[in-house]
Image (tube, rainbow, N blue to C red):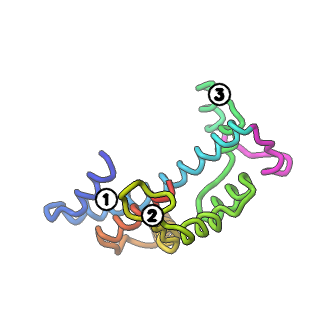
Amino acid sequence: MRIRQLLDLLNNRDTPPVIKKSLKRFLVISLISTFEFYFKNMASKYVDSNNVDLTQLFRDEICIKLSDLDIILKDNMITKGNILISSVKFSDLHQINNFISKLLEIDLFEYLYTENTKDKCKMMIRNAPPIDINYKDLFDAYDLRNKVVHGLSDIPYSYTHILKLWDNAMKYI
Protein backbone atom coordinates (compact mmCIF):
# COMPACT_ATOMS: atom_id res chain seq x y z
CA MET A 1 0.00 0.00 0.00
CA ARG A 2 1.11 3.52 -0.65
CA ILE A 3 1.28 6.23 2.00
CA ARG A 4 -1.68 8.13 0.50
CA GLN A 5 -3.85 5.01 0.78
CA LEU A 6 -2.79 4.55 4.42
CA LEU A 7 -3.61 8.18 5.17
CA ASP A 8 -7.02 7.70 3.54
CA LEU A 9 -7.61 4.60 5.65
CA LEU A 10 -6.66 6.58 8.76
CA ASN A 11 -9.20 9.25 7.78
CA ASN A 12 -11.98 6.73 7.11
CA ARG A 13 -14.71 6.74 9.79
CA ASP A 14 -15.20 2.99 9.39
CA THR A 15 -11.61 2.13 10.28
CA PRO A 16 -11.57 0.56 13.76
CA PRO A 17 -9.74 2.59 16.45
CA VAL A 18 -7.15 -0.13 17.03
CA ILE A 19 -6.24 -0.04 13.32
CA LYS A 20 -6.09 3.77 13.39
CA LYS A 21 -3.71 3.63 16.34
CA SER A 22 -1.41 1.24 14.47
CA LEU A 23 -1.64 3.32 11.30
CA LYS A 24 -0.61 6.47 13.16
CA ARG A 25 2.40 4.70 14.64
CA PHE A 26 3.39 3.24 11.28
CA LEU A 27 2.96 6.55 9.43
CA VAL A 28 5.12 8.47 11.89
CA ILE A 29 7.88 5.83 11.91
CA SER A 30 7.84 5.39 8.12
CA LEU A 31 7.94 9.17 7.61
CA ILE A 32 11.26 9.43 9.40
CA SER A 33 12.56 6.22 7.81
CA THR A 34 11.79 7.69 4.38
CA PHE A 35 13.61 10.88 5.28
CA GLU A 36 16.64 8.96 6.59
CA PHE A 37 16.67 6.70 3.50
CA TYR A 38 16.64 9.74 1.20
CA PHE A 39 19.59 11.42 2.91
CA LYS A 40 21.62 8.21 3.17
CA ASN A 41 21.17 7.51 -0.53
CA MET A 42 21.89 11.11 -1.45
CA ALA A 43 25.13 10.93 0.56
CA SER A 44 26.10 7.60 -1.03
CA LYS A 45 25.54 8.88 -4.56
CA TYR A 46 27.40 12.11 -3.83
CA VAL A 47 30.41 10.23 -2.43
CA ASP A 48 30.53 7.86 -5.40
CA SER A 49 29.94 10.56 -8.05
CA ASN A 50 32.53 12.92 -6.62
CA ASN A 51 35.10 10.40 -5.40
CA VAL A 52 35.04 12.02 -1.97
CA ASP A 53 37.99 11.44 0.30
CA LEU A 54 36.37 9.72 3.28
CA THR A 55 39.14 10.84 5.61
CA GLN A 56 37.50 14.28 5.59
CA LEU A 57 34.39 12.70 7.13
CA PHE A 58 35.92 10.14 9.47
CA ARG A 59 39.07 10.18 11.53
CA ASP A 60 40.87 7.02 10.62
CA GLU A 61 38.29 4.26 10.62
CA ILE A 62 34.63 3.51 10.20
CA CYS A 63 32.47 0.94 11.92
CA ILE A 64 30.13 -1.23 9.93
CA LYS A 65 27.61 -3.82 11.01
CA LEU A 66 28.52 -7.29 9.81
CA SER A 67 24.97 -7.78 8.51
CA ASP A 68 25.39 -4.66 6.34
CA LEU A 69 28.77 -5.90 5.14
CA ASP A 70 27.24 -9.27 4.19
CA ILE A 71 24.55 -7.52 2.14
CA ILE A 72 27.09 -5.31 0.38
CA LEU A 73 29.38 -8.24 -0.41
CA LYS A 74 26.52 -10.52 -1.48
CA ASP A 75 25.12 -8.01 -3.95
CA ASN A 76 28.52 -6.87 -5.29
CA MET A 77 27.66 -3.33 -4.24
CA ILE A 78 31.03 -2.36 -2.86
CA THR A 79 31.42 1.36 -3.34
CA LYS A 80 32.68 4.06 -1.03
CA GLY A 81 29.15 5.41 -0.83
CA ASN A 82 27.60 2.09 0.20
CA ILE A 83 30.24 1.47 2.83
CA LEU A 84 29.75 5.03 4.04
CA ILE A 85 25.97 4.79 4.53
CA SER A 86 26.36 1.47 6.31
CA SER A 87 28.51 3.15 8.92
CA VAL A 88 26.58 6.38 9.47
CA LYS A 89 23.56 6.82 11.73
CA PHE A 90 20.89 9.31 10.79
CA SER A 91 18.64 8.80 13.79
CA ASP A 92 18.11 12.49 14.44
CA LEU A 93 18.12 15.71 12.45
CA HIS A 94 21.28 17.00 14.06
CA GLN A 95 23.20 13.90 12.90
CA ILE A 96 21.83 14.34 9.38
CA ASN A 97 22.68 18.04 9.32
CA ASN A 98 26.16 17.53 10.77
CA PHE A 99 27.09 14.72 8.39
CA ILE A 100 25.62 16.21 5.19
CA SER A 101 27.04 19.63 6.10
CA LYS A 102 30.51 18.11 6.50
CA LEU A 103 30.10 16.18 3.24
CA LEU A 104 28.96 19.21 1.21
CA GLU A 105 31.08 21.71 3.17
CA ILE A 106 28.06 23.90 3.94
CA ASP A 107 25.57 24.07 6.81
CA LEU A 108 22.73 22.13 5.15
CA PHE A 109 19.82 23.33 7.25
CA GLU A 110 21.08 26.90 7.29
CA TYR A 111 21.37 26.76 3.50
CA LEU A 112 17.86 25.29 3.10
CA TYR A 113 16.44 27.84 5.52
CA THR A 114 18.14 30.74 3.73
CA GLU A 115 17.03 29.58 0.31
CA ASN A 116 13.51 28.90 1.50
CA THR A 117 13.07 32.25 3.25
CA LYS A 118 14.79 34.26 0.50
CA ASP A 119 12.48 33.15 -2.31
CA LYS A 120 9.75 30.62 -1.62
CA CYS A 121 8.91 30.50 -5.34
CA LYS A 122 12.46 29.76 -6.52
CA MET A 123 12.12 26.00 -6.75
CA MET A 124 8.41 25.72 -7.45
CA ILE A 125 6.77 24.11 -10.43
CA ARG A 126 5.16 26.60 -12.79
CA ASN A 127 1.72 27.66 -11.52
CA ALA A 128 2.20 25.70 -8.29
CA PRO A 129 2.14 27.19 -4.80
CA PRO A 130 5.45 28.17 -3.18
CA ILE A 131 7.31 25.54 -1.21
CA ASP A 132 7.07 26.49 2.45
CA ILE A 133 9.21 24.25 4.67
CA ASN A 134 8.34 24.22 8.35
CA TYR A 135 11.43 23.24 10.34
CA LYS A 136 9.55 23.01 13.63
CA ASP A 137 7.26 20.34 12.13
CA LEU A 138 10.25 18.33 10.96
CA PHE A 139 11.79 18.36 14.45
CA ASP A 140 8.34 17.57 15.85
CA ALA A 141 8.07 14.51 13.58
CA TYR A 142 11.49 13.24 14.70
CA ASP A 143 10.65 13.80 18.35
CA LEU A 144 7.34 12.01 17.96
CA ARG A 145 8.97 9.08 16.16
CA ASN A 146 11.51 8.70 18.97
CA LYS A 147 8.76 8.70 21.59
CA VAL A 148 6.77 6.10 19.65
CA VAL A 149 9.75 3.83 18.97
CA HIS A 150 10.83 3.90 22.61
CA GLY A 151 7.29 3.33 23.87
CA LEU A 152 7.07 6.68 25.58
CA SER A 153 4.01 7.95 23.78
CA ASP A 154 1.00 7.10 21.72
CA ILE A 155 0.19 9.28 18.76
CA PRO A 156 -2.14 12.00 20.01
CA TYR A 157 -2.24 13.64 16.61
CA SER A 158 -5.11 13.66 14.19
CA TYR A 159 -5.12 12.59 10.56
CA THR A 160 -4.66 16.25 9.57
CA HIS A 161 -1.57 16.69 11.72
CA ILE A 162 0.08 13.50 10.47
CA LEU A 163 -0.72 14.52 6.88
CA LYS A 164 0.88 17.92 7.58
CA LEU A 165 4.04 16.24 8.92
CA TRP A 166 4.28 14.07 5.79
CA ASP A 167 3.66 16.97 3.42
CA ASN A 168 6.30 19.07 5.15
CA ALA A 169 8.98 16.35 5.10
CA MET A 170 8.39 15.59 1.42
CA LYS A 171 9.23 19.20 0.56
CA TYR A 172 12.86 18.42 1.42
CA ILE A 173 13.05 15.47 -0.90
Report the front residue among 90 and 163. 163
Residues marked 2 and 3 touching at CB (< 8 Å) = no
Q: Which residue is mark 2?
A: 131
* Kind of element beneath mark 2: loop
Sequence-wise, which precedes: disc 2 or disc 1?
Answer: 1
Work out which residue is located at the far left of the displayed protein and give it: 14
**Rendered location of residue 171, percent (x, y):** 46, 59
Q: Is residue 117 above or below residue 64?
A: below
How many numbered circles does the render carry?
3
Q: Nearer the viewer, residue 86 or 126?
A: 126
Could you tell me the amino acid type at mark 1? Answer: Leu
Residue type, mark 2 in image? Ile
Which residue position is annotated with label 3?
73
Label 1 secondary element:
helix
Q: Which residues are magenta?
A: 51-65
Q: Is residue 106 magenta?
A: no
Estimate the spatial distance between the alpha carbons at disc 2 and disc 1, rounded to whole Å. 27 Å
Q: Which residue is mark 1?
A: 23
Q: Position of residue 149 (x, y in %)?
A: 47, 62
The location of residue 129, given as percent across then percent down, is 38, 63
Instruction: Please give the name of the residue rendered at 37% of the width and 67% of the height, measured from the top-left corner.
Output: 164
Question: What residue do we see at 34% from left, 71% from top?
Answer: 161
Main secondary structure of the magenta stretch? loop
Kindly identify which numbered label has been placed on residue 62. none
| Camera-nearest residue between 22 and 54 | 54
In primary-sequence order, the first of circles 3 and 1 is 1
- Graded by Cα atoms within 10 Å as few (under 14), some (14 to 19) or many (20 or more), the crowding at tag 2 reads some
Say if the magenta span includes residue 57: yes
Q: Nearer the viewer, mark 2 or mark 3?
A: 2
